[in-house]
Amino acid sequence: MRAQPTVPAITVEPVVPGSVDLRLLDVSDGRLALARDGGSLLTGETGLLREVGEHRQLAYAYAEINDLQGEVLRWSEAVGEQKFVLHTVNLSTGVRTAQRIDEAPMAWTPQGWIGLRDGTLTQHEGETERVLFKGVPDDDLLFWPWAVSDGERTMLSYSPNDDVPLRVVLITDGGAQVETLGEVRGKSGELISGMALTPQSEVWIGSKYGKVTVHRRDRTTGRVADVPVPGLNGEDLPTVAADDETIVVKEDRGFLGEGAVGRLRRWDGSAWTTLKLAGSTSEDIKGLGGFALDDGSVYLSVSGAIDGAAGVYRVDADGQAQRVATAAGVRSVFAEMALSGGRLYFTERRAALPVAYDVPLYSRTLLRTPGGDLAGLGARAAEGPVTDYPDRKNRPTFSVSGDRIMVGPGRRELWSSFIGPSFVIDRLKTVKQSGAYLLGSGKLYAANPARSDAVLTAQLDLKTQPADLFGPRVLWRTRAGRVLFRNVLNGRSSRELVASGASGPVAIWRNRFAWLDERGRIGVRALAGGKTRYLAADSVRTLSLSEQVLSWTDSGGGVHLLDLTRKNSQPVETGLRTPYQIDGDLLAGLDESGNIRVEQLPFSDRNIPPRLISAVAPKTVGAGTEWTAQFDVTGPVRQARLQIRRDGRVVRTLTGQGRHNLIEIDWNARTSTGKKVKPGRYQFILKGVEPTEGRGTVRGVLRVTR
């Protein structure tokens, strides 16, 4: 059955970035190949470039190389330690190939490629392999080896030893001839940072004492012409592109992408020309990315505002770069989403995901009518620290419970609007929060209000077993199919066997739990026992419980709901997909278009009082000092009051400071008249919130010391 919302849903669309990161990979016969935003491949000659699939590669990384010949682009991708993939794509037809290798690719040749493994440089052409050179250290962190080749000649830059940190050699005759072109030895020699091969020459560029020089060696005579490059200092390791008539030198003066700043010089055989964007007087080109030579023409890419300077440029005879091609922006993608404490949280990333990408965590407040209906969303606001995407496969996870936000990925930081960052836990792969407690990589942690920088690890290690929690209440499934429950506040002896025959995810909410059994059915039952309700479901991947709703996802990420308040209710297909979350009477998830849709559940009681998730408070407080208690609850509390009592007499009544389902109350161990209370045993009672166990009051005990 398909859900029918009682009120219109609210849709949140991802933004279309106003800027684009462009990196020119190569040019062949006027055809362009570019990487957009570090992940998608663009091609064309003029006008608006078109997308032809993915291009995953670290910009300017060791062992990641590109080559365009006619319509075929070749590039390499690092996918692990000493693991690489060689890609080809026909830019006209889109036909692709991929070959996994265990050598670091160093250069493309017309008929193959050159790789490095265990210090040996090998040329590959079809099934033929030929060793070109041995003795190349491939673990030097300062000067990575790299090469250029035309199949007959190979120029190699490497670090032979500590005495000679850098050497450039020319390898010919299939490795039989090796000639040193330049090296650094002590205070002598140049730091060579760029190489190129032309039909009639070998070209390299070196820096020494703030001076940059290009060297061109005639292939026939062996004579070397030295050409100093004015206006460059060599500090940023200039690179070079060349043909037999033209030399182009680039020096980067900033970071990659939009923040990059670079300079270009062109040598025509008689003089250097500074290349500038048309209409600009500055020698610095902001957003300068890749550059290439094609049939004597210089091309370059510029990152930046789509309606500004971003695009591909071709340099005319006067050194003016005229824009010839542009790239459209691509709508961002919602990476993750959460709904908690009356707020919608989400992260957005560019559709083409680079290897490393910092993104802020945003939130929008849910707005309601006086009658409680969903009315809209507040403005977008950034929450806490940024999170990042460490690689191409593992998305970061953030987890939200009320006002507590845990962001990651590997080094996770807990954030609260009350206290800002409170603690950091390293090496957590997965995180789920519930109040002051969180499950991270199979271990349970708890926040401590007495020390904002502390982390308490409970005596519970579930390793990789499926688990869920509701505050201090933890539910998990063992490999033997047993479903176990434990309230960590009650010690190890509180562990209970609550079900058997499980084979999948588990879920818990207050006094109710759910599990997937060996027959593929979802079982729901109270922790105290009683009748189990079974539900047939296909391909269940995740389970979740809220106050009145059981929800789960199928193998395609589709979200399904079941009303637990009605005995004969039927599953409801929401039309949403993961990531999703239920908070009170609201459901949020991704629709078919990739937008976030927030809607009120087709069945929910809005009059459910807020339930206590967790209460964390110091057990003692010194007379006249500060005592802080934190109460995480399932819904907003209009007026939270905390009574401090002794022997049944009210000593102090405090109003709780609450935000997004987290109530924080401070007491200075004084009476309402300002007098210090006497040492002894006191009781606190929180009004306006129901405890986890049934109905009643939330209460606890503390001791005031001298």
Image (cartoon, rainbow, N blue to C red):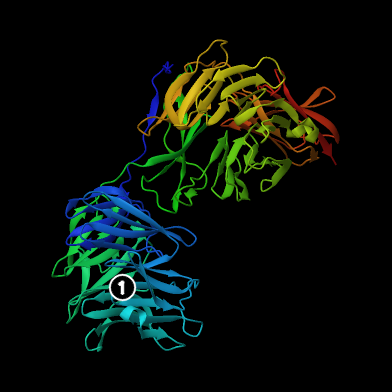
Q: Position of residue 476 (x, y in %)?
A: 66, 33
Residue 413: image x %, image y %?
58, 47
Q: Dot 1: within a 10 Å radius of its alpha carbon, few (fewer than 14), some, or many (20 or more) residues?
A: many
At which x and y percent is residue 225? 24, 87
- Which residue, given by chain and number where applicable, does mark 1 sit on? 149
Q: Identify the amino acid type marked 1.
A: Ser
**Left or right: 566 as drawn, with respect to 95:** right
| Relative vertical location of residue 260 with respect to residue 559 in this rendering, above or below | below
- In the figure, residue 608 lies in which quadrant? top right
Q: Is residue 71 left or right of residue 458?
A: left
- As displayed, is residue 692 above or below residue 286? above
**Is residue 234 something that shows in the picture?**
no
Taking depth in this image into account, of 111 and 87 the one nearest to the observer is 111
Compared with residue 153, is residue 281 higher up or lower down, i.e. above or below? above
Quadrant of the rendering where the N terminus is positioned:
top left
Q: Residue furthest front?
A: 127
Horizontal and vertical percent position of residue 76: 37, 60
Question: Which residue is found at the position 19% from the left and 77% from the top?
Answer: 244
Write the residue at 36% across / 73% down: 147
